Image: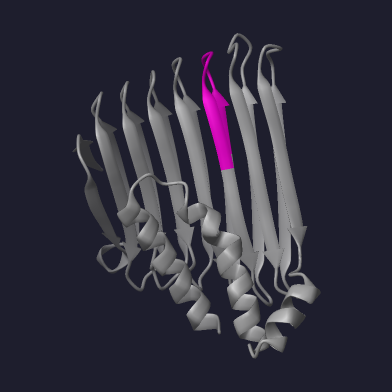
Amino acid sequence: MNLITINDSKKITVNSDKGSACRISLDVEKRSKANVVIFLEGKGQLKLDLNVRVGSDCQVVFLTVNHNEAEIEFNEKYDIYADSKVTIAHMELSEYKAVYNSEHQLLQQGAELTVQTASVSDSRKIFNQDTFHNAGNTTAHINNYGVVMANGYTDMVVRNTIVQGAHNSATHQTSRLLTYDKSAIGRILPVLYIYDDEVRASHAASLGQPDEEQIYYLQSRGLSLNEAVGLIVKGYLLPVTQILEDENLNRLLLDEIEKKVNQNA
């Protein structure tokens, strides 16, 4: 297992050509402010186990970008301590099967979590996300935006749990899937487990195909069907590029989306 101490921004590259299994532990020192970007690369199947401990009073962004040219399984666990603000972003635009198993533990008061996922599925994408409020005054915003292309499949299971005694906590989910046509399959399962009365909790989910009138309008302006759908896909995923406070990371996310849209145009 690789143990990496984080106290400033860092880029980590995981190359599947060097091995099909990798375990990484990140220890973010208290009062750190950092952007951690993880690139998945190579041509082999990959299983990555990531364990992250975020000390108190931190502001940290974790961004994972999947460029691996084979299927992946990504298991991640985050322990977040007092008054830390953590953003976790996934850019999953690969052509291959990907499984994400995510666990977020808000362990002390003031811990705040934002999850932003952008996914385009040409094959099979599975997201299992679990967030636990283990202390009062903790906050979580889980936001998933996905596009399922022709013959693709995406499954999103999002579970948020507020334990008894976690007073004044807030947990919110937004999951949206856009399906290219009738051959594209999407499933969203939002779940809230609430064991305390003095909390705020909500979820929103939507699943459907692009608006035919929008496509017709764009085609009337000279765009092909693929170009019109690509433009809609780009607009659909843009919210993920606007949540991060770092302009360079936002630009990176936007570039990734534009590459995918151009590839399918």
Q: Would residue 196 be found to the left or right of residue 249 on screen?
A: right
Please state the horizontal and vertical placement of residue 244, each as a whole percent of the image: 41, 46
Picture quadrant where residue 122 is located: bottom right
Q: Position of residue 89 (x, y in %)?
A: 44, 49
Question: Is residue 203 something one can see in this rendering?
Answer: yes
Specify the quadrant of the image occupied by residue 209: bottom right
Q: How many marks?
A: 0
Q: Answer yes or no: is residue 182 visible.
A: no
Per the rendered image, the range of residues in magenta is 130-142
Q: Nearer the viewer, residue 190 or 113?
A: 113
Residue 149: where, in percent of width, then height?
A: 64, 73
Where does residue 160 sit, x and y in percent of width and height?
62, 31
Asked whether 7 falls inside the magenta stretch, the response is: no
* Above or below for 250 versus 217: above
- Residue 137 inside the magenta-drawn segment: yes
- Looking at the picture, tell me which residue is in the foreground, 214 or 101: 214
Quadrant of the image containing the N terminus: top left
Rendered position, 133 above or below 93: above
Applied colour scheme: one colour
Residue at left offset 72%, top offset 71%: 184
Main SS class of the magenta portion in the image: strand
- Residue at (64, 80) in percent of width and height: 228
249 with respect to 32 (left or right): right
